[in-house]
């Protein structure tokens, strides 16, 4: 089981270009809460689940338009690799490195 808790420096490659953020994970057993904070604001983790080294969660984006993002990530050591699903806009890769 991967250690997922902490802060991660992330980059999401979206149609608006690379979006930098800090993804914060607070583990509670096989669930987690947290935030993803970037230039367009802070999104709360909704329905965060942990299954081994895999995380799944949702976020409610407000800017530039309201939509629910469906996210799935794999954690390996100090590296996080994720896919952010944005409905009709497709899926975007998100990579992260654990903050020391």
Image (cartoon, helix red, strand yellow):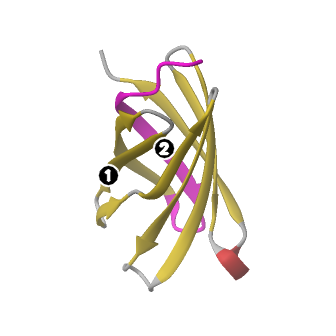
Is 88 included in the stretch rendered in magenta?
A: no
Crowd band around label 2 with a 10 angstrom C-alpha radius: few (<14), some (14–19), many (20+)? many
The reply to whether callout 2 and callout 1 are in contact (CB within 8 Å) is no
- Quarter of the image holding residue 62? bottom left
- Give the residue drawn at x 44%, y 33%: 29
Read off the magenta span: 1-17
- The mark nearer the N terminus, 2 or 1, is 2
- Give the residue drawn at x 72%, y 81%: 88
Depth order, front residue of 47/15: 47
Q: Secondary structure at mark 2?
A: strand
The image's mark for residue 11 is 2
Q: For mark 1, what is the residue?
A: 35
Q: Secondary structure at mark 1?
A: strand
- Give the residue drawn at x 44%, y 39%: 10
Q: Marks 2 and 1, how far apart in space?
A: 14 Å
Q: Nearer the viewer, mark 2 or mark 1?
A: 1
Vertically, is 35 above or below 89?
Answer: above
Depth order, front residue of 20/46: 46
- Give the residue drawn at x 37%, y 78%: 63
């Amino acid at each position: 089981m991967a250690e997922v808790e902490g802060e991660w420096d992330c980059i999401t490659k979206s149609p608006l270009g690379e979006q930098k953020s800090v993804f914060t994970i607070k583990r509670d057993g096989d669930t987690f809460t947290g935030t993803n904070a970037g230039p367009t604001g802070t999104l709360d983790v909704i329905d965060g689940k942990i299954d081994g080294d895999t995380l799944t969660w949702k976020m409610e984006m407000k800017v530039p338009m309201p939509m629910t993002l469906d996210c799935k990530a794999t954690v390996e050591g100090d590296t996080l690799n994720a896919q952010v699903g944005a409905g009709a806009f497709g899926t975007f890769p998100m990579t992260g490195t654990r903050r020391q």
